[in-house]
Image (spheres, rainbow, N blue to C red):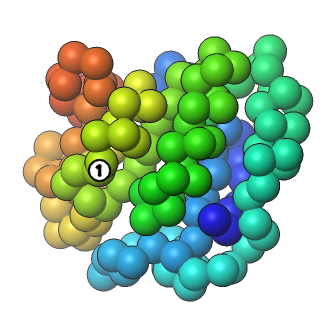
């Protein structure tokens, strides 16, 4: 599994400081995607278990969540990374353009953002969006956390 980029982000998971791993090879290739550079499989560097654990350890007292932008197409590897994050007491989140992911991935998540990007509907901060930000445990949609009112 190739990670194109790693960043510490503050807005993608409300109330959390998230370690964000952008995974390359997205098969969806949504029209108007803000990250078309993630479409190419193999761009970036291999996300090894060692590198991932080093990042988790480095930010252990600073960050609260691990966020994957994609990667569900590498099911076993993604599950493994999510388990490691959970074992180190991080909350977990996946941003996917799919409507659903496998139960085994879902079982490792705190939150999931689902839904293909449709420019005319907008993102999570739009009242017309097709995307959903879901609390996995309660299955409640939390899109209101992204809107201003």
Identify the residue shown where x is 28% and y is 65%: 117
Give the tally of numbered discs: 1
Image coordinates of residue 59 in percent, x first then y, are: 81, 27
Q: Mark 1: give few (<14), some (14-19) or many (20+) Cα within 10 Å.
A: some
Identify the residue shown where x is 66% and y is 80%: 42
Identify the residue shown where x is 64% and y is 51%: 21
Camera-nearest residue between 19 and 122? 19
Q: Is residue 69 visible?
A: no
Identify the residue shown where x is 87% and y is 38%: 54
Q: Is residue 28 left or right of residue 42?
A: left
Q: Is residue 65 left or right of residue 34?
A: right
Camera-nearest residue between 29 and 31? 29
Please identify the quadrant where the C terminus is shown: top left
- In this figure, which residue is indicated by the disc labeled 1? 101
Q: Quadrant of residue 145?
A: top left
Q: Residue furthest left?
A: 128
Q: Is residue 108 visible?
A: yes
Q: Is residue 3 left or right of residue 129?
A: right
In the displayed structure, 93 sits above or below 87; it is below
In the displayed structure, 138 sits above or below 48; it is above
Camera-nearest residue between 13 and 104? 104
Image coordinates of residue 63 in percent, x first then y, are: 70, 24
Please identify the quadrant where the N terminus is shown: bottom right
Q: Is residue 43 left or right of residue 56?
A: left
Image coordinates of residue 19 in percent, x first then y, are: 67, 38
In the displayed structure, 38 sits above or below 124; it is below
Image coordinates of residue 55 in percent, x first then y, are: 82, 38
Camera-nearest residue between 21 and 79? 79
Check disc 1 and report its element: helix, strand or loop: loop
């Amino acid at each position: 599994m190739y990670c194109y980029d790693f960043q510490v982000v503050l807005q993608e998971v409300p109330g959390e400081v998230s370690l964000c791993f952008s995974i390359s090879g997205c098969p969806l290739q949504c029209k108007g995607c803000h990250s078309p550079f993630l479409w190419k499989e193999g761009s970036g560097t291999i996300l090894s278990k060692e590198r991932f654990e080093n990042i988790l350890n480095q930010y252990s007292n600073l960050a609260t969540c691990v966020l994957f932008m994609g990667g569900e197409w590498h099911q076993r590897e993604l599950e493994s990374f999510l388990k490691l994050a959970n074992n180190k007491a991080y909350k977990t989140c996946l941003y996917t353009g799919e409507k659903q992911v496998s139960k085994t991935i879902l079982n490792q998540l705190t939150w999931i953002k689902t839904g293909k990007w449709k420019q005319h509907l907008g993102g999570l901060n739009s009242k017309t969006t097709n995307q959903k930000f879901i609390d996995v445990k309660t299955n409640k949609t939390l899109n209101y956390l992204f809107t201003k009112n």
